[in-house]
Image: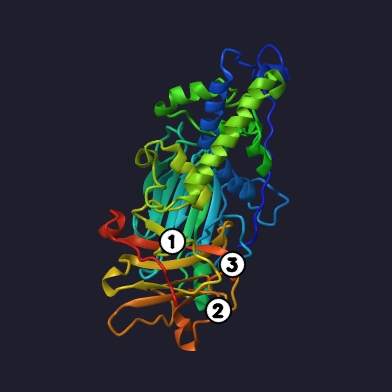
Amino acid sequence: MKKIIFLAVIVFLITTACKKETPLDKTNTADNSVSPDSVTAIAKEAWIYGYPVFYNYKMIYATALNKQSGEFVGFNKFKNIAMSATPSDTLVVTINNDTPYSMASLNVSDEPVVIELPKVEENRYYVMQFVDLYTFNFEYLGSRVSGNNPGKYLIAGPDWKGETPKGINKVLKSETNLIFLVGRTQLHSPEDVSNLKKIQEQYKLMPLHEYTKQPVPQVKKYDLPLPVWKEDDYSTPEFINVLNALLQYANVDSSETKLRERFAKIGIIPGKRFDSSKYSPETIIAIEKGIIEAKKELESGVTNLRDFGNLFGTRKALENNYMNRAIAAAAGIYGNTKEEAVYTGSAVDKDNQPLAGNKNYILKFSKNQLPEAKYFWSITMYNLPKRLLVRNPISRYSIGNKSKGLKYESNGDLIIYLQASSPGKDKESNWLPTPKNENFNFVIRIYGPNEKVINGSWKMPLPEIVK
C-alpha cells in the first residue's frame, strides 16, 4: 500500500434571508469567566476526546479529498489494495499484513450509500468494518456476521428517516455522517493475488439515488469547510478549529451533552470558527498547557499498553472511555471489535525487559497454548517507537498458522524464532525477523477467536532469550 496523503475541498458560503454574515458572526468569542486551571483541564479532556477523530480524518482526507494524492478516489468509492503491506506503508501504525485492504471514505450527509457484496468462497475470510468519525466500530458485515453469500446493505447517517428500498438486506445506522470503511480479505499466498483482485472488484458502493433511480438529493451545507489535514494542527490551539469543522458531521450523543457544554467554554462549538485573538494570552497559554498534559498522558497509556482487547468496539462497549479510544487510535487505529478479532502482543520478554533487535528470542507455544481461531491467527513484527513493519532479507513481516511450511515439534508445540539473523536453514520456516538495531514489539491477531480468547482466559506466552 502506497503512502497516502489527503486534502479538503468543500467550501460553502452561508447566507441568511436578510443579510450576508460577516466572518465575525461565525467566530467564537472568549468566555472570561473560566479560570486558567479550568481551561487547561477542559483543553486536556477535549484534546484526548478529539485525537481519534483527527487521525481518522487523516485517512478520510487521504482517500477522499486530496486530489493531488496518487491514492485519491473520492467519497463513496473503494480503494482496493491487492497485496500485503510492506515497510513502505507508513501511513497507518501497526498495519495489518494478513488481509489486504479495501478502504472507502463515506459521506452520507446528503443520502445513504448502498454497499453490494459478492459471493465469497467459504474458505476465504473477509470482513467489512464500519467505523464512524469517533472511531467506534458501529457495524460489521462479512464471514462472521453475514456470511460469505452475496448481499446489499444500506449505510445511513443519524438523521436519515427514509423507507428501506426493496432488495436491501439490512440498514446500517451511523451516528456520524463521515464514516471510514475498512474491508479486509484474506490472502492465502502471493500466488493468490489474482483471485483476491477478482473478489475486491466485486465490492461495490453507490449512492441511494442511483440504486433507486431517483433524482439527486439536495446537498447539505455546513458552516465550516472540511480542513486540510496537517499533523502540526493538533499540537496547537488550532486543534479547536479542526474539531469545530469535523464535529459538524456528528450528532451530539445524549451521554455527551454536558461534555460538549464544557468544551464550548474554550471555543469548541461545531460550525463556529475559533479565533485565538479573541482570547486572552492567559487563556491561550492554559489551552497549550492542556495539550501538553494530554500528550504526556496519552504517551504513557500507549507505552504501558499490554492488552488491546477492550480498546475497540461500539460506543456502548467502550463506555465513553475517551482515553482508551485515543490509545487505540495511537497504537493501532481501526482495530477490530474483539468478537471479530482479538489483538495481543508484547514489547517485553518474560523477564519484563524490552525486546531488543540485538538479541535472539524464541516464542514458544505449548500444544495446548496455541491460539484457537475459527479463521486463522498470525504474528506481525513492528519496530519501536514507529510501530512500522521491519525490513528483512526474506521479506517476511508476519507468520501464523496458515504460513506455508510452518513446522511443529513432535509433541505438537510450536516455536517461533524472533531474531535479526537467520536461526539456520532448518529453522527458517519458523523465523520472524526482527530489526537489527531497534527495539521491537509484535502483535498477535486472532481472527474468529474462541470464547477463551475473547474473555481473556487464554494467555499468550512471552519471548525467552536464547542463550
Residue pointed to by mark 3: 86
Closest to the observer, 300 or 16: 300
**Distance of label 2 from label 3 (alpha carbons):** 19 Å
- Residues at marks 2 and 1 touching, judged by CB atoms closer than 8 Å: no
Q: Is residue 32 left or right of residue 423?
A: right
Residue 213 x %, y %: 52, 44
Residue 257 x %, y %: 44, 23
Q: Residue at x 58, y 22 (%)?
A: 266
**Distance of label 1 from label 3 (alpha carbons):** 28 Å
Q: Residue at x 30, y 55 (%)?
A: 454
In the rendered image, the vertical position of residue 191 relative to residue 376, given as above or below: below
- Residues at marks 1 and 3 touching, judged by CB atoms closer than 8 Å: no
Residue pointed to by mark 1: 118
Question: Which of the numbered marks, if any, corresponds to residue 421?
Answer: 2
Residue 109 shows in the view = no
Q: Amino acid at mark 3?
A: Thr
Closest to the observer, 341 or 295: 295
- Which class describes the residues within 10 Å of circle 2: few (<14), some (14-19), or many (20+)? many
Residue 170 shows in the view = yes
Residue furthest to the bottom in view is: 426
Q: Amino acid at mark 2?
A: Ser
Mark 1 or mark 3: name the one nearer the start of the chain: 3
In the rendered image, the vertical position of residue 445 relative to residue 328, given as above or below: below
Q: Secondary structure at mark 2?
A: loop
**What quarter of the picture does the N terminus occupy?**
bottom right
Number of numbered discs overlaid on the protein picture: 3
Camera-near label (2 vs 1) is 2
